[in-house]
Image: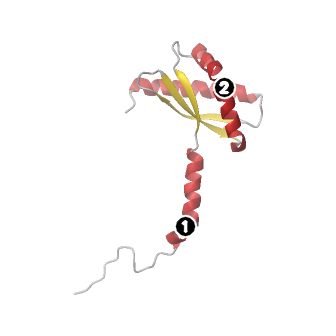
Amino acid sequence: MEGKRQAKIARLIQKELSEIFRRQTAAMGNVLVSVSTVRVSPDLSIAKAYLSIFPPEKSNEILKNIQKQTKTVRYELAAETLRKCPDLQFFLDDSLDYAENIDRLLATDPHLHDTPADEGGKETAQD
């Protein structure tokens, strides 16, 4: 269970990281980095930021670049908002890809469409 302070700091970090990435990617053109979730450890020492990157073909390359620049991003974040900024860890948020894959698998599963009419929980009267 996340405490109120953790949640408040996570929202603040998410908002500020989004702004930092918006400024940094504005010059690149055709690249969008959004911060989908931030989770802060109970002792407020580590913040894990999950990023959604568009276009997906460049996501690994951009994520590696962001991970190399973690100290710079942390410095900017500390200068903007927090006096004592947690260590930042960046991860690729693949939840949309995961959900899309599940939808695709469900759409192509032949067993979901071929259920017999007599099955499905109907009771038959046998007295």
**What is the basis of the colouring in this image?**
secondary structure
Residue 72 position within the rendered picture, expressed as x and y whole percent measured from the top left: 65, 19
Q: Secondary structure at mark 2?
A: helix
**Around disc 1, counting alpha carbons within 10 Å, would you say few (fewer than 14), some (14 to 19), or many (20 or more)?**
few
Q: Real-space Cα distance between discs 1 and 2?
A: 42 Å
Q: Quadrant of the N terminus?
A: top left
Q: Quadrant of the C terminus?
A: bottom left
Q: Which residue is mark 1?
A: 109
Whether the residues at callouts 1 and 2 have beta carbons within 8 Å, the answer is: no
When asked about the image quadrant of residue 121, the answer is bottom left
When asked about the image quadrant of residue 91, the answer is top right
In the image, is residue 9 above or below residue 84?
below
Q: Earlier in the sequence, mark 1 or mark 2?
A: 2
Residue 9 position within the rendered picture, expressed as x and y whole percent measured from the top left: 48, 23
In the image, is residue 3 above or below residue 113?
above
- Residue 18 appears left or right of 24: left
Residue 47, numbered circle = none
Residue 78 position within the rendered picture, expressed as x and y whole percent measured from the top left: 57, 15
Residue 68, numbered circle = 2
**Amino acid tagged 2:** Lys
The residue sitting at 58% across, 55% down in the picture is 101
**Amino acid tagged 1:** Asp
Residue 35 position within the rendered picture, expressed as x and y whole percent measured from the top left: 59, 33
Residue at the far bottom: name it. Answer: 127
The residue sitting at 49% across, 24% down in the picture is 46
Q: Secondary structure at mark 1?
A: loop
The residue sitting at 30% across, 82% down in the picture is 124
- Residue 61 appears left or right of 10: right
* Count of numbered circles on the image: 2
